[in-house]
Image (tube, rainbow, N blue to C red):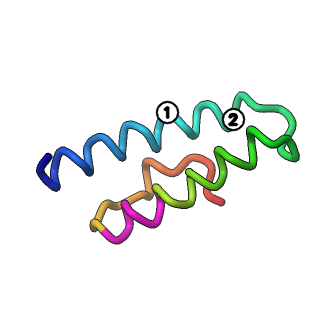
Amino acid sequence: MTEKEMIKISIEEFSRLQKYMILTSDKESAPYKEMRSRYIELKVFLQISGVNLTELDIIKE
């Protein structure tokens, strides 16, 4: 897998994950906490990869 493919997949997962987080009403639930943890991991990876998250990051945590 190339770096570009990895970034593309990560962007898709980041966007999908944010939609799930928005749909979750209980922010103290175990599933939400797991999603938030993955959200942070993806956000860090994308920032390190040089992706501008200004438009992509709708959660902004």
Residue at the far left in the pictured view: 2
Mark 2 — residue?
A: 22
Q: Residue at x 46, y 55 (%)?
A: 42
Is residue 47 placed above or below 32 in the rendered structure?
Answer: below
Which quadrant: the C terminus? bottom right
Could you tell whether 3 is left or right of 34 in the image?
left
Query: Horizontal and vertical percent for residue 11?
Result: 36, 45
Query: Where 48 sits versus 13, above or below?
Result: below
| Local secondary structure at mark 1 | helix
Residue type of the residue flagged with mark 1? Arg
The crowd level at tag 1 (other Cα within 10 Å; few <14, some 14-19, many 20+) is few
User: Would residue 27 appear left or right of 52 to someone viewing this image?
Assistant: right
Residue appearing at x 64%, y 44% in the figure: 35
The CA span between labels 1 and 2 is 10 Å
Residue at the disc numbered 1: 16
User: Residue 37 appears at what percent x and percent y?
Assistant: 63, 55
Query: Which region shows up in magenta?
Result: 43-48
Report whether 50 appears left or right of 28.
Answer: left
